[in-house]
Every structure is written in structure tokens, then in C-alpha cells.
Image (cartoon, grey):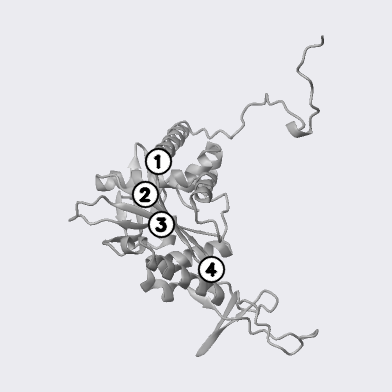
């Protein structure tokens, strides 16, 4: 659990390029995830910041982390991301008795002076563990194709320009420390070109287009993420970077769609962030963290679709 009450004194505003994700996650500051829960209530936001709301890990999250590392920090990919071999377990009964399982490996068993073995959930061995960062061989293949597709796209040239990848940012707003972690910041202090923030989002086949991208931005609160990253970097760099999303399909044909965030979207995101931070500041000062529905005077019953349709016409 992050100690938000006592750990903030150690924070210093700035850009941090060498922080691991775990180190960044443990920094006692408000991120976009906290803002999202703050849109619900201050009680939700406090629970998130205290680590009481479990966001968990998933296959999709592992795949996303691996793809980010391969695309933005390729020199670290082989050291940080394991590629799971097929399960080496043996079927003990049934029509496949005696045959090797060969399902996707999930649990890794290491032995001294021997190559690690992988097992599926059915054949998991004592002492085997699920690594934090791994992908299956099939997923690794998809990630390589995603990286190649980005390299061939026009945006690939931009990503190779001078800048920083997986950079953590931290700044203070009034009495509140804030943080963000940028996928790629293209910035050259010796150039007249404005900085650009690039944020990678994987998507399903056929979803790399404006309509689906905008729907996801609204549903997942990515407009607040964009506004928060730009705000933080503006505080540190003294200039306002542009922000762009890179949507890339996670299976063939690995199409790419790049969309710059417009000013209206950024302004709305910033307005929502400021509203939440103002409420959070008051909650911290008063030590009162109200829930979403504090009133007892709530009236309701059946949902609208289950209620009979009544005529609004006056009798003749």
C-alpha cells in the first residue's frame, strides 16, 4: 500500500527516465487512475490511492506492457519480458494419454543448470510460478508484427527522433502531488519544434479508426490522461506539448491509426481534472471523504424500461 499521508515529503518535481514501473507506481501522487475514481467520489479516490481497490493484472495488461517495452524500449525487451514455451506436461489419462500437452505455458519452473520449463494451469507443478512479465510465443509474434507495422508507418519516423521513452513526470499543484508516465516524449531542446507526447493503444482488428478511437477515449477517460500528461509536462518544460494517440491492431493486418488530440478535448479533460483535484484538496483539509450518494432521500424502483407507458394526453 502506498503511504500517501507520509511519503509525499520525499518527492521532487521533474522528469524521471530511469524509474521502473514499480517504482513509479509506488510514488505517493495522484495519477489519471485516481482522477477516474475521483469522478465517482472522494471515497472511491481515497480507496484507490490507498491500494484498497484492486486493479489486478491480466493477460491483456501483460501483453500491453510487453508491447510497450518492445516498441519504446527494444533494448530492454529480451531482458524484461519472458516468452513462454508450450506446456511440457504429460497427459496421464484419456485419448491423449502419454502425449505432451503443448498448450500455452503460464507457470514457469526453474531448476539449477537447466532450462526453465513452462506448464499450463492443468499441469502446474509444485514450485512453478506465474512471472510478472511474460507473453506466449504467439503473442510475442503479434508484438513483433505490431512493431514492424509502426516502423513502416509515417509515425515511425517521429518515434525515432530525439526524446525519451517511458518517462515518469511528477509535479505539485497547490497541496497535491501529481504524476504521469509517458510512453514517448519527442523533444529536442535545441530544436524549434514543439514537443509531442505519443501514447500507444492496442486495439482489435478493424478498430483502428476515428470512430472507434473516439469511443474508447470517452469510455476509458483517455482525454483526462492526455490533459494530465500535457499539463504536467507544461509545468516542467515551460511549453505545452502536443498529444497524439497511436492505435495499432494487435493481430493481422496490424493496421495503424494516429490521432492528435484536439484542443477542445484537452480543455474538457483538464476541466474534469481540476474539478476532482479541488474536491480532493478540500477532502484532505477537512478529513472528510464523502461517497457518491450521501443523501438518504433517493427515490426509485423499477427501471424506466420496465414501467408501463402512460398517456400524457388530457381526456377529451
Splitting the image into 4 quarters, where does residue 267 fall? top left
- Foreground mark, 2 or 3, reads 2
Disc 4 to disc 3, how far (Cα)? 33 Å
Nearer-N-terminus badge (4/2):
2
What label sits on residue 24 in the rendered view? 3
Q: Position of residue 304 (x, y in %)?
A: 74, 31
Q: Are marks 4 and 3 in contact (CB under 8 Å)?
A: no
Disc 2 to disc 1, how far (Cα)? 9 Å
Q: Residue furthest left?
A: 190
Splitting the image into 4 quarters, where does residue 15 fall? bottom left
Q: Secondary structure at mark 1?
A: helix
What label sits on residue 181 in the rendered view? none
Q: Are marks 1 and 3 in contact (CB under 8 Å)?
A: no
What label sits on residue 252 in the rendered view? 4
For the residue pair 312 and 297, the one nearer the viewer reads as 312
For the residue pair 148 and 290, the one nearer the viewer reads as 148
- Foreground mark, 4 or 1, reads 4
Q: Is residue 14 left or right of residue 110?
A: left
Q: Position of residue 245 (x, y in %)?
A: 42, 53
Q: Is residue 27 left or right of residue 213?
A: left
Q: Position of residue 107 (x, y in %)?
A: 60, 75
Q: Are marks 2 and 1 in contact (CB under 8 Å)?
A: yes
Residue under pointer 1? 266
Residue under pointer 2? 243
Q: Secondary structure at mark 2?
A: strand
- Foreground mark, 4 or 2, reads 4
Nearer-N-terminus badge (2/1):
2
Q: Are marks 4 and 2 in contact (CB under 8 Å)?
A: no
Q: Residues within 10 Å of mark 1 (few under 14, many from 20)?
A: many
Amino acid at each position: 500500500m502506498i503511504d500517501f499521508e507520509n511519503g509525499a515529503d520525499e518527492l521532487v518535481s521533474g522528469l524521471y527516465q530511469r524509474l521502473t514501473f514499480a517504482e513509479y507506481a509506488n510514488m505517493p501522487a495522484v495519477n489519471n487512475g485516481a482522477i477516474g475514481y475521483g469522478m465517482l467520489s472522494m471515497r472511491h479516490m481515497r480507496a484507490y490511492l490507498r491500494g484498497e481497490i484492486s486493479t489486478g493484472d491480466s493477460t491483456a495488461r501483460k501483453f500491453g506492457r510487453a508491447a510497450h517495452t518492445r516498441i519504446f524500449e527494444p533494448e530492454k525487451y529480451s531482458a524484461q519480458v519472458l516468452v513462454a514455451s508450450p506446456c511440457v506436461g504429460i497427459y496421464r489419462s484419456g485419448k491423449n494419454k502419454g502425449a505432451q500437452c503443448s498448450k500455452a505455458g503460464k507457470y514457469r519452473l526453474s531448476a539449477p543448470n537447466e532450462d526453465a520449463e513452462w506448464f499450463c494451469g492443468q499441469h502446474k507443478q509444485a514450485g512453478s510460478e506465474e512471472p510478472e512479465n511474460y507473453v506466449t510465443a504467439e503473442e510475442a509474434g503479434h508484438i513483433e508484427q505490431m512493431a514492424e507495422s509502426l516502423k513502416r508507418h509515417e509515425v515511425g519516423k517521429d518515434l525515432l527522433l530525439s526524446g525519451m521513452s517511458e518517462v515518469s513526470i511528477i509535479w505539485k499543484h497547490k497541496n497535491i502531488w501529481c504524476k504521469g508516465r509517458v510512453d514517448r516524449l519527442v523533444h529536442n531542446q535545441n530544436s524549434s519544434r514543439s514537443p509531442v507526447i505519443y501514447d500507444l493503444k492496442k486495439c482489435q482488428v478493424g478498430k483502428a479508426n476515428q470512430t472507434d478511437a473516439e469511443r474508447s477515449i470517452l469510455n476509458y477517460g483517455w482525454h483526462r490522461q492526455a490533459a494530465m500528461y500535457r499539463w504536467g509536462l507544461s509545468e516542467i518544460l515551460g511549453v505545452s506539448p502536443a498529444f497524439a494517440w497511436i492505435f495499432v491492431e494487435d493481430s493481422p493486418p496490424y493496421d495503424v491509426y494516429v490521432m492528435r488530440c484536439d484542443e477542445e478535448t484537452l480543455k474538457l479533460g483538464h476541466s474534469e481534472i481540476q474539478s476532482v483535484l479541488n474536491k480532493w484538496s478540500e477532502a484532505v483539509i477537512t478529513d472528510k471523504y464523502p461517497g457518491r450518494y450521501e443523501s438518504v432521500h433517493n427515490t426509485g424502483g423499477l427501471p424506466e424500461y420496465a414501467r408501463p407507458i402512460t398517456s400524457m394526453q388530457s381526456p377529451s
